[in-house]
Amino acid sequence: MNPMLKNILAVVGGIVAGSIVNMGLVNIGPLVIPLPEGTDVTSMEKLRESMHLFTPSNFLFPFLGHALGTLVGAFVAAKLAATHQLRSAMIIGAFFLVGGIAAVKMIGGPIWFNVVDLICAYLPMGYLGGFLAGRRSSAPST
C-alpha cells in the first residue's frame, strides 16, 4: 500500500478510535458521578444553562474522555502509520484540540476546566500516544 495512503488511513483510524473512547467516557461519566439536581443536558443550550450547577467532580469524565480519547487515537494512528508516526499522532492531538476549542466556544464552562482541558488533554496526550506507540520492547525475540 502507498505509504501516504496508509498514513491518511492511520489518522482516520486514530480519529475513529479516539472518538469512540472519548464518547464512551463522556457518556459513562454521569452513571459514575451523577449530574447535579436540576441539570438538563438534552441540548447544547440547556447544557450551557446548567453548567453553573456542575461541581468539579462532574468535569472528571469529560476531561478523561478528552485526554484518553486523544491518547488512544494518537497511539492507534502512530501504530498504523507507515512513516511519520509522531506526526500522525500529533495530527490527532491537533484534531481533538480544535474540537475542544469548539466545545469551549459552544458550551462554555468554568475557566479553570477550559484551561486545564485545552492545555493538558490534547497536544500532550497526542505526543504521549505517539511516543508510546514508537517504543519497542527490549525483550529479545525468540
Image (cartoon, helix red, strand yellow):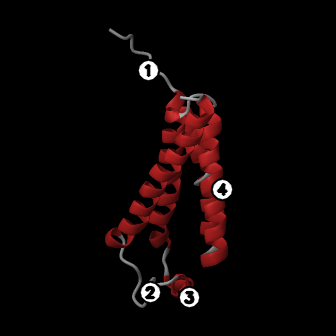
At which x and y percent is residue 8? Answer: 59, 41
* N-term-proximal mark, 1 vs 3: 3
Question: Tag 3: Cα neighbours inside 10 Å, few (<14), some, or many (≥20)?
Answer: some
Residue 69: assigned label: none
Question: Is residue 108 something one can see in this rendering?
Answer: no
Kindly check if marks 4 and 3 are in contact, taking CB atoms under 8 A apart as contact: no
Where residue 24 sits: x, y (%)?
A: 39, 61
Q: Cα distance, mark 1 to mark 3?
A: 49 Å
Disc 2 residue type?
A: Thr
Q: Using the image, tell me which numbered label, if any, was put on residue 39.
A: 2
Q: Which mark is residue 137?
A: 1
The residues tagged by marks 4 and 2 sit, at their Cα atoms, a distance apart of 27 Å
| Pointer 1 local density, CA inside 10 Å: few below 14, some 14–19, many at least 20 | few
Q: Amino acid at mark 4?
A: Ile
Q: CA distance from mark 1 to mark 2?
A: 47 Å
- Give the structural element (helix, strand or loop) at label 1: loop
Residue kind at label 3, given as amino acid type: Glu
In the shown orientation, is residue 80 left or right of residue 117? left
129 relative to 110 in the view: left or right: left
Label 1 – label 4 distance at C-alpha: 30 Å
Which residue lies at the image location 45% right of the left edge and 50% below the top edge? Answer: 17
> Which one is nearer the viewer's eye here, 39 or 130?
130
Q: Nearer the viewer, mark 1 or mark 4?
A: 1
Residue to which mark 4 is pinned: 119
As shown in the figure, which amino acid type bears the numbered disc 1? Ser
Residue at position x 55%, y 35% from top?
6
